[in-house]
Amino acid sequence: MTAELRDVPAPAKLNLFLHVVGRRADGYHLLQTVFRFIDLQDTLHFRARGDGRIRRVRELPGVPEDADLTVRAARALQQATGCTLGADIELEKRIPAGGGLGGGSSDAASVLLALNRLWNTGLSRRQLMQLALPLGADVPVFVFGRNAFAEGVGEELSALALPRRWYVVAQPDASVPTAEAFRAPELTRDSARVKIADFPGSSFGCGFRNDLEPVVFARFSEVGAAAAGLAKVLDGAKVRMSGSGACLFVEYDTQAQANGAVVKITATMQGQPGVMPALRLSMASAGLDAHPLLDWAA
């Protein structure tokens, strides 16, 4: 048994579009979306314990241990396999919370993949995905490991080859609770379904959008103002929100274009604060071809 795993990545995701196409009787929303992994990532470290205890090494502000997705994922794997081992879990957080980038979901998926290896529990990717879904609708795609066209509540996944792209990712001075965005009575819940073949591989496809944007822009004025500011500073670029926000992104063909956009945003915030609202985060990030832990499950 390997006693320790260090520097385990948990990448962020973008929703290149997000359509709400219905609602189940249990209240869960039916979606169509494309998940794209990007190179912004959290990092986790694991050490096996012989006493069966799951212990997080660092506190996560505002998140009690029993509600922490990393702890819940580890306990789910223990329960499903009858494993008597435990683990110390250390999380280095870089993906902003409340940003729509799937940080907590990605962390949970990396816990399942890593502890399945550390504890030698031997579950398949499909079995790990089944454990992932009760933890959150976005967790299965990170276990799936490939950029994907997703349907259902996000668990019906089809691998999707996406072109090489770079993204400017910006977080306004806001965090958006996912549940609040989906509960909004004004949310469109009957978007027409699309086919995977209809998606052009870019976030700029005609007719593709994020149905949550109008809700979030209206309820969280900082997000709407940041989207308008980014579009103005970046010469009318298409600005899209990821998931339920608050993070926004702009897609570029080259790294140089993305880096140049970040420079322009930073310069505008410093020199013309009324044009571009303050941002918690502004960075260029590469789209990934696959999850970095793709080969950790079969």
Image (spheres, rainbow, N blue to C red):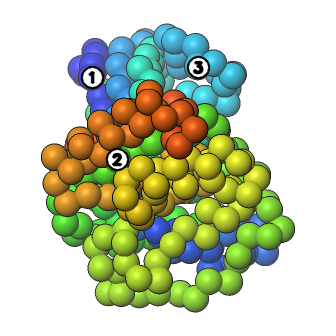
- Amino acid type assigned to the residue bearing label 2 in the image: Val
Q: Nearer the viewer, residue 200 or 65?
A: 200
Image x and y of residue 58, in percent: 51, 12
Q: For residue 60, which numbered disc appears in the image?
A: 3
Image quadrant where one finds the N terminus: top left
Position of 46 relative to 111 (above/below): above
Residue 7 numbered mark, or none: 1
Closer to the eye: label 3 or 2: 2
Viewer-nearest residue: 131 or 140: 140
Image x and y of residue 139, in percent: 49, 50
Using the rendered image of the protein, determine whether residue 259 is visible from the camera's viewpoint: yes
Q: Position of residue 8 (x, y in %)?
A: 29, 28
| Mark pair 3, 2: CA separation | 26 Å
> Which disc, if any, is residue 168?
2
Residue density around tag 1, few if under 14, some if 14–19, many if 20 or more, within 10 Å: few
- SS of the residue at dot 3? loop
Answer with mark 3 or mark 2, whichever residue precedes in sequence: 3
